[in-house]
Amino acid sequence: MKLLKIISSLALGALLIGSVNAQEAPGKKKLAITKIAPTESVKARMAKQGVGLSLSSVLEALDSQVYDRVLNTKRFEILERSDADALAKEQQAAGNAMQFNQADYILTIRVDGFNDRMETRTLAALGKTVTARVIELSAVAKITEVSTQRAVASTNFQVSRRQADQLSGNTTAKVGESSDALLTDITREMAQKIASRVADTVYPARIIGKRDKVVTINRNDTSGIKVGQVWEVFTLGGDLVDPDTGDKTREEVFVGKVKISRVTPQNSQADIVEDTGIDRLAIVRLKDDVADPAPAE
């Protein structure tokens, strides 16, 4: 009987410890993503140029791709899109500032630039001309903290893609709206850039493990991190106050560099290149990116 009581007490103790640890974990922030829309000038210009369908396709794809990429950062609880749009519409109709009681942050995206054109180049050495479709996309993403209604980040992103399969002068030109591959590629790239920015703004990438000359970073294979990238490492120092604005920040002390060597569905590993104090929980920021493979022409 005494043995059963001891076992029960140990089990209860373990349960309480687990409960306390769970409460100590900060948990995921809640994010609302409003419907992506173009500026009125972009919308009118695309309609005039006759590529309105391309713009609509990009907006629809970007809407779902951003949701997917942000969700796959595994850093946020995402409000259902229908709820976010309904709340935004209700607030705007009432003439109020956009607020979401259920969310910690709001992500709004506006497409402020778009081009879908055919480019023709003359290759003198080959004695022929080639034509390729080029799509350019520009968008501004803003992250607003609900509790303060303060914009904590606003970034302009620009991406451009040129189709790989060029057309010779003897080939009938493709209609601009006939191929979705390029539109899909450009929206995926834009969505990844935005999702990475959102994650890094709210949850800066950190070192969560160190063993010999290898560190583990809390970014997985859906975060945009790539083998070969070089990241700088910083530890947080004391509080800093801007004498002009009163804004408060934390000092970041540079303590080294790491190079990404392995990316997995859970996290990433990097080899230490320079170390003057790298340790667990240090912040890492991308320094040198790795270019994506160029499409074959």
Image (spheres, rainbow, N blue to C red):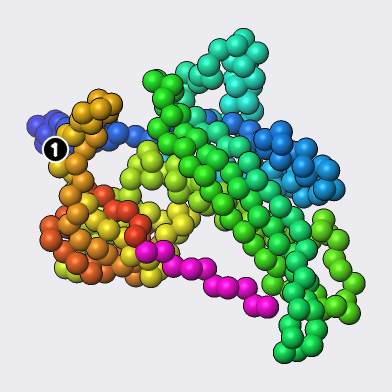
x 22%, y 52%: residue: 234
Residue 290 on the magenta span: yes
Asked if one can make out residue 166 in the rendered structure from this viewpoint, the answer is no
x 62%, y 59%: residue: 160
Asked if one can make out residue 278 in the rendered structure from this viewpoint, the answer is yes
Image position of 248 (left or right of 297): left
Q: Nearer the viewer, residue 152 or 279?
A: 152
Q: Position of residue 240 (x, y in %)?
A: 18, 34
At label 1, counting other C-alpha atoms closer than 10 Å, the crowd grade (few under 14, some 14-19, many 20 or more) is few
Place residue 149 in its image quadrant: top left
Furthest residue to the left? 2
Q: Secondary structure at mark 1?
A: strand
Residue 8 on the magenta span: no
Instruction: Name the kind of residue labelled 1 in the image.
Output: Gly
Q: How many discs appear? A: 1
Q: Nearer the viewer, residue 125 or 186?
A: 125
x 74%, y 86%: residue: 124
Mostly what secondary structure, the magenta segment? loop
Q: Position of residue 188 (x, y in %)?
A: 60, 54
Q: Nearer the viewer, residue 160 or 275?
A: 160
Q: Quadrant of the N terminus?
A: top left
Image position of 51 (left or right of 160): right
Q: Quadrant of the C terminus?
A: bottom right
Q: Position of residue 43 (x, y in %)?
A: 75, 38
* Range shown magenta: 288-297
For disc 1, the marked residue is: 238
Furthest residue to the top? 94
* Above or below 54: residue 26: above
Q: Position of residue 120 (x, y in %)?
A: 77, 70
* Above or below 43: residue 261: below
Place residue 38 in its image quadrant: top right
Q: Nearer the viewer, residue 42 or 37?
A: 42
